[in-house]
Amino acid sequence: MMVKMKIRNTIRNLIACALLITASLFAHGQFVKTIHSYLPAPGQYTNSEQIGRPAAAQSIVSKLNGLVSLGGYGGYIVVGFDHSIENDPANPYGVDFTIFGNATSIWSETGIVQVMRDDNANGLPDDTWYEIAGSDHHFSTTKANYQMTYTNPGDGIVADINWTDNIGQSGTMRANSFHQQPYYPMSAWFPGVNTGQLTFSGTLVAGNIDISSAMQVVVHPRAFGYADNTKTISLTENLPDNPYTFEIEGSGGDAIDISWARDANRNYVELNKIDFVRIYTGMNAIAGWLGEISAEIAGIRDVAPQTAQGKTQMVVMEDLPKSVFKNDVLSLKAHSFSKGKPLAETIEWTATPADAVKIENGKLTALKSGTVALKVWLASDHSVFAEHELKIISAGNAKIELSTTTVQKNDKLKLTGKITDDAGNTIAGMTGEWSSGDNTVFSITEEDGQAYLLALKEGQAWLRFQAKEKPEIKDLVQITVLPESVAKKVFVSVKTETATLFPRQSLMVELFDLNAFVDSRGGDYSIQAVSKTTVAHAIAQVFKQMQTSGDFKFRDDVRGNNQLYIWKIPETDNGSTVLHYGYGGTRETDAYKKVWLVKINQQTFVSGLETEINNGDELLIYHIPDNSVNWQFTQLTADNDSISRNETVAIQRMQFLCSMNADRQVSVTSSDVMSGASVKIDGGETKQTDEFGKVSFSLAQSGNYIAVSGIDKLKLNVAGTTGIHDLSQQQITVYPNPANRQIWINSDLQTGTVELFDLSGRRVLQQNFENDAPMDISFLKPGVYLLRLSSENEIFQQKIIKQ
């Protein structure tokens, strides 16, 4: 993956400054001329319109400002040129071509390079491939003859993808919220692809990923010999980077010497020229919340002969951890190279301070806590060296940090924890792992790299958090799973093609009889027939809250395949009402192709709205005029809809391209975050979204706010930070307290909002305030709750007891 959106946008900004590359360069055919084949492995950019389809592969032809993703491990592209690329020792540093990607100084996605000479002179890549042996091909962690198989969850289906390999490992590539198109190559874009399984083979490079910081994931670049590995400096500079230094010179990018090529037996071969280049993703790894490692290619340039001076020898360490504990023992391995090939030269290790470690027989023993500077150099030339900073820690601690230790069945709980040293500082390079003491009570799941606890049944079990690299550093907390709540807290927004009718906000959805909301109904939607809280309840709840439920209706006729669908939704403006109709996905006439769609998390429904909802679900109800053609829509979300004064809220805007087949199945064919989108808070400032489509706001005054971006809107509630009511208690009376089934609130207020929160801070009820009107709390479990009454910029809070 690219860091991930950030890097793609950075490289495009860089490329935009270099669009006028001289015409003479094109005339000499320095660049890719032909895409012979392209098959990305499964990945979050595979099938995406921007960089995951054959058209994206064509974007690197004749230029350096394209961009195409190769997906996860094994995904590849094969390119040709209008001339042979010579293996010319007169080229700078002896390199022959440069591959440009979108790497940065802290983000590399190792692409393995293969080359072929057109021995039979037929212009096709059907001769022998030779693999470029980069620095890590000599590492003990690198695996030759690796094979990995992905299983398709279903053509066109957005779902996690399982994989297995030939060394006994298996895993899952998880779909994320940033990209909601299918991750397995679709036959629509890649005709002839095996729609059941895909197997890729080659060399596997381990790489070095650091996900110990939640704020910044680092994938350390390899020393030399790989694509999408070295940062681009300039697309107009003809002098290539010197691959034998750790600095970046010239144009940057990844300079490749054809002399690094090896045959299938890993013997070096001397090719005088090559005609084809094949690049494939060489790592099988997940980089935390940024997703899978997937090499991206922007272009390839033939290097022209010119004079350049620079080092051609280097020493490369095999990857070491950033932190170790006293008495830990590490294996020290390093490799020396001359012009990219192994050098039979003695190397020496040193450490400063020398008494902090013991280095003997290729082993390092940590003796004293503190920071140690490690160096390895050529015995004959100490100016050729590599270095690494190692922190030695005397003790470590793991700490689970949760908002609550009780959770209701089918609810999720965000998991956060820290691994620190004895001074309380986060240990760099050390990652935490979560596990359940009883997977029948709760399991551990992951969304966008964030761990969650998923409650499965009532009971108690231990939650464990431990250091992956040192399992004895751990913490345990007992979790209690309570009965499932009938009322569900979800996030809902409703919009037409031109306006938002109900800004995105949280909604407490209760179970009620739906029959009155179904026009000409053919089925029974009473509580007896529909015993779970569903999508339909959430939609109907919106219009109950807006007090326009009389103009809102579902239907369940043949146009919706005899399943529940949205028939009409009212839009009220200045006293007049316009009705927006949908017809369940039918295509019987052009007039009936209008449809209301319901996006629930990453799945879209046309009908069948009796689907059960869970706490935290994200619902977007939107309208399109014609279901027979592809459509695009946008969505505005936030990480919270209720914050305290001066607390930060993150807002994100995304866009999607979708299509629907005759069976009413909706597919997301492309999704992307919207970088540079304007987001305005009413009465406040306007900001632009960043490379992840996000923008953050902090509001100093309590009250309700609306955030706007395009036609999308969301509602934010900002409460006081003191927890003390701003309204006078003498004005408000809550009775009875304790209560069993109902409570009443007596106040002089004319308008307001009433909310109830459980002790974990989860909102369990929300409704408009009506003076001295009964408020039903019979569905709540016995316990203590916090009642909040908000009116304009004032807040009253009081604890109540439900018996």
Image (cartoon, rainbow, N blue to C red):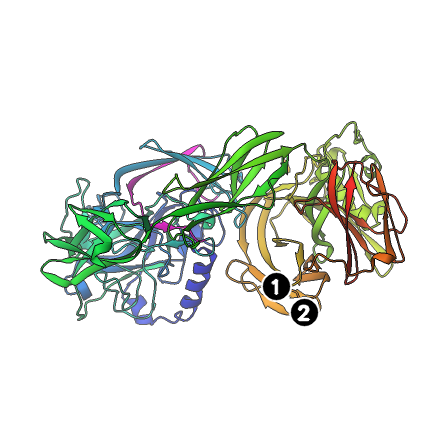
Q: Amino acid at mark 1?
A: Phe
User: Percent from the top left, x then y, of residue 697?
Assistant: 61, 63
User: Percent from the top left, x then y, of residue 102?
Assistant: 38, 59
Residue that mark 1 sits on: 697
Residue that mark 2 sits on: 684
Identify the element where label 1 is drawn: strand
Identify the element where label 2 is drawn: loop
Instruction: Say which residue appears at 34% left-offset and 62% top-offset.
Output: 231
Which range of residues does the magenta coloring cover?
189-213
Query: In the rendered image of this protein, does residue 669 appear above or below residue 706?
Result: above
N-term-proximal mark, 1 vs 2 = 2
Query: In the rendered image of this protein, does residue 574 appear above or below residue 615?
Result: below
Q: Nearer the viewer, residue 344 or 341?
A: 344
Q: Main secondary structure of the magenta part?
A: loop
| Label 1 neighbour load within 10 Å: few <14, some 14-19, many 20+ | some
Left/right of residue 213 with respect to residue 78 in the rendered view: right
- Whether tag 1 and tag 2 are in contact, CB under 8 A, the answer is yes
Quarter of the image that includes the C terminus? top right
Q: Nearer the viewer, residue 255 or 540?
A: 540
Residue 466 visible somewhere in the drawing? no
Q: Amino acid at mark 2?
A: Gly
Residue 532, quarter of picture: top right
Separation of marks 1 and 2 at Cα, in angstroms: 10 Å
- The question of residue 208 being in magenta is answered with yes
User: Percent from the top left, x then y, of residue 82?
Assistant: 27, 58
